[in-house]
Image (spheres, helix red, strand yellow):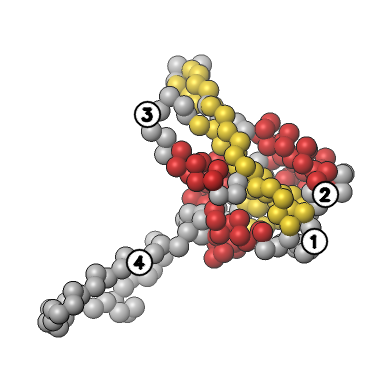
Amino acid sequence: MIFYPQERIGLFIDGANLYAAARALGFDIDYKRLLDLFAAKGRLIRAFYYTALVEDQEYSPIRPLVDWLDYNGYTMVTKPTKEFTDAMGRRKIKGNMDIELAIDVMEMAQHLDHIVLFSGDGDFRRLVEAVQRKGVRVTVVSTVRSQPPMVADELRRQADNFQELQDLEPSICRVQREPREPREPRGERREPRDTGSQQVLSSQDVDTTPR
């Protein structure tokens, strides 16, 4: 990614699309690390996150994430999902946020020098072209390394820069912390563990053949 220190940067995150891309690559995103990464690259003006919410659920698994983002530097744009029945009689849930994202990008373009779009949706190609005509540079963040690729070819071609999401993994992935080993109470002496009966696996014992 090419950024300049005085650039005004705006992040526009298609939540469902980014989640699907990260899952396809096998990692979870730490959104604090993501925000810090781009804040260090220039003047981060705003970070928008778009997602639809199922309102009639007793518990929504995405609600804790939405609340955390709302309190920690992100501008949340949400709307309730719509339920309908298709021609086959199957229950479907719709929650497309493309219009909301496109409107915010157009409104914010005059205040930004560089837009970072976290989505691979080809419907955004014309949006990218429109803000480029206003003199704004656009970086698209998605992946071509999943099967199938998550980014549309026409969107990737239109963008000024394409950032492979997998290359950002070391900087934005959620780090699993190892549980702390319980401390030994003072005054008590712990006997050495007998490891004679434990099997220790080396790299030679483990089958690392790709499956």
Pointers 2 and 4 in contact (C-beta within 8 Å)? no
Which disc, if any, is residue 182? none
Residue type pointed to by label 2: Val
**Drawn side of residue 69 relative to residue 3, left or right:** left
Q: Is residue 63 visible?
A: yes
SS for tag 1? loop
Identify residue for label 2. Answer: 136
Q: Amino acid at mark 1?
A: Gln
What residue lies at 87% left-to-right and 44% top-to-bottom?
A: 134
Query: Residue 114 location in percent, x, y?
Result: 77, 52
Q: Nearer the viewer, residue 12 or 189?
A: 189
What residue appears at the point 50 percent right and 32 percent down from the top-left corner?
Answer: 53
Residue sitting at x 54%, y 53%: 31
Q: CA distance from mark 1 to mark 2?
A: 14 Å
Label 2: how many Cα within 10 Å (few below 14, some 14–19, many 20+): many
Q: Name the residue type under label 3.
A: Glu
Other residues around mark 3 within 10 Å, as few (<14) / some (14–19) / many (≥20): few
